[in-house]
Image (tube, grey):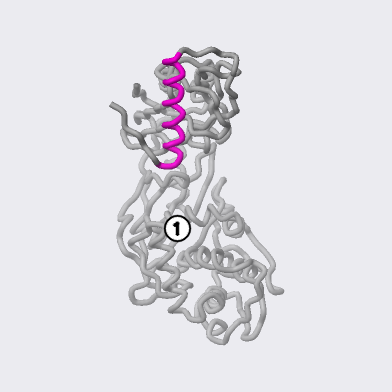
Amino acid sequence: MTIISTARSTRQCFALSRACLREGGMAVKKTLCLLLALACVTPVRALAAQPEISAQAYIVTDAESGRVLYGRNKDEHMLIASVTKLVTALVVAERCELTEKVTVPRESANVEGSSMYLKEGEQLTVLELLYGMLLESGNDAAAALAYHVSGSIEGFAELMNEKAKQLGANDSSFKNPHGLDAPDHYSCARDMAIIAAEVLKNKTLADICATLSASAGGRTLTNHNKLLTLYPGVTGLKTGYTKNAGRTLVSCAEKNGLRLICVTLNAPDDWNDHAALYDRAFSEFTRAAVCAAGEKCASVPVLSGTVEAAGVCALQSCGVTVAAGEKVEVECSLPDFVYAPVKKGEMAGEYRVKLNGETVCTVPLVFAQDVPLDESVKLTFWEKLKRAWYISNKISARYGIYAVYG
C-alpha cells in the first residue's frame, strides 16, 4: 500500500512516523503510519528569484544523492583548467600511502603555470604534495605525483580516465594531471560534480580542500579558494584558470543538514555565481531524514518465539532533498509476521523512498535482536508444516535457491 503526499521537510515529521511504526501492527498499518507523517510537514520559504549567472556552464547538485537541482549547459564539453586536480587527487589517494616519499623529477620542477616551487631532487611526502596541489594549485606538485604513481604523464592520464569512467563521468577526457590546456583534455559541469562528490567521501582530501593555509616542505601554502571565507558553510573544493578555459570553480557548501555541490565553468564572476546559486538552493530545498543507520524503526510479530515481536532497524541512513510541492512516496515493506527463531541482522524488509515517482533511496531493514524458538509452544500439525516451509524458504533464499510452490 502506498500513499502519496506533498513533502516540504522536516525531520520531525519523519520522527513521528518512526514513533508510529514502533507501536507495531500489521505491515499495511506500518506503511500507513509512515506515509501519513509526510502530510504534516511545513512549507519552506518563498522561492528565491532566479539569479543572473555569468558562467557559460554550471550545475548545482545534492552531494549525497547526486540529484541535479539547477544547471545550464551542464553536459557541454569544456576546458576545465586546474579543477582537473580533483581527479588527480582521487587517483593518488587510491594508489599511494600519504607518508610515501616522492623525489621531484626535473620534468615536474619545470612545469609552467601555478606552482609550489619544487626543486629537482627535493623529497616531499605524498600528503605534502597533495596540499601543494590542492591549496596552491601547484602544477609541479600534480606532475610530481603523476610521475611517482605511473612514471609518465601519459600513463597517469590513463588512470585518470579509468577513474572517471568508473564514477560514471563519461563526458570527460584527461591528458594531464594539472589541467593546462591540451587537445582532448576536457570535462563538463555534470562530470565535475560527480567527481567532487567522490572527493568529499575521502576525509583526507575533503579536509585538505577545506584548509585555508598549511605548511609543507618548508613552504607556507595558501588556499586559492576565497569562497571558503566569503560564503558561510563552504567547505571546499578547487579553483582553476587558464586564458582559454576562463575561471573555473568547484565548491561545496553545507547548511541545515543539506550538502550541495556547485560547479561553474568559464565564469567571469564565479564567486558571486556560487553565492547566488547557494542562496537560491538553500531557500528552495531542504533535507529530510527518513531513517538513521541502526535506528529501530518498526517491529514484526514473531510466532512461536520467546517474545511476541522482533525489533527492526535500518541498515543504513537515508534522507531526501525536497522542494515545496514535490511528491514523496515512502513505502515500508515488512511481513505481517515471522516464525522463530529470528537472528539479529537477518533481512526483514526495506524502505523505498520515491521522489516525483522515481526511487531515490532503498534501505534494507534488518532484525535488531535474536528471538529464540519457545519450545513450550505447542503447534498443530499444519502449523508445524507451515513453519517448516517458511524456514526452508528462508534458507534457500540465503543461498540463492528459490523454490516455487503452486
Classify residue 336 by image quadrant: top left
Secondary element type, mark 1: helix
Q: Is residue 133 above or below residue 313?
A: below
Classify residue 246 by image quadrant: bottom left
Q: Is residue 8 visible?
A: yes
Query: Residue 227, how many percent across, how many down?
Result: 53, 54
Query: Residue 198, how many percent across, how many down?
Result: 49, 55
Q: Is residue 356 left or right of residue 367?
A: left
Query: Residue 234, how many percent across, how many down?
Result: 55, 49
x 46%, y 28%: residue? 391
Task: Check if residue 393 falls in the magenta segment.
Answer: yes
Q: Is residue 38 above or below residue 83?
A: above
- Span colored in magenta: 381-400
Q: Nearer the viewer, residue 357 or 262?
A: 357
> The N terminus is located in which quarter?
top left
Q: Is residue 37 visible?
A: no
Pointer 1: what residue?
Answer: 195
Classify residue 344 by image quadrant: top right
Q: Nearer the viewer, residue 352 or 273?
A: 352
Which amino acid type corresponds to the residue marked 1 in the rendered image?
A: Ile
x 39%, y 44%: residue? 67
- Callout 1 crowding tier (Cα within 10 Å): few <14, some 14–19, many ≥20: many
Q: Nearer the viewer, residue 156 or 80?
A: 156
Query: Residue 226, how many percent across, how many down?
Result: 55, 58
Task: Check if residue 174 falls in the magenta segment.
Answer: no
**Residue farthest to the front?**
381
Q: Is residue 199 above or below residue 158?
A: above
> The C terminus is located in which quarter?
top left
Q: Is residue 38 left or right of residue 109?
A: left
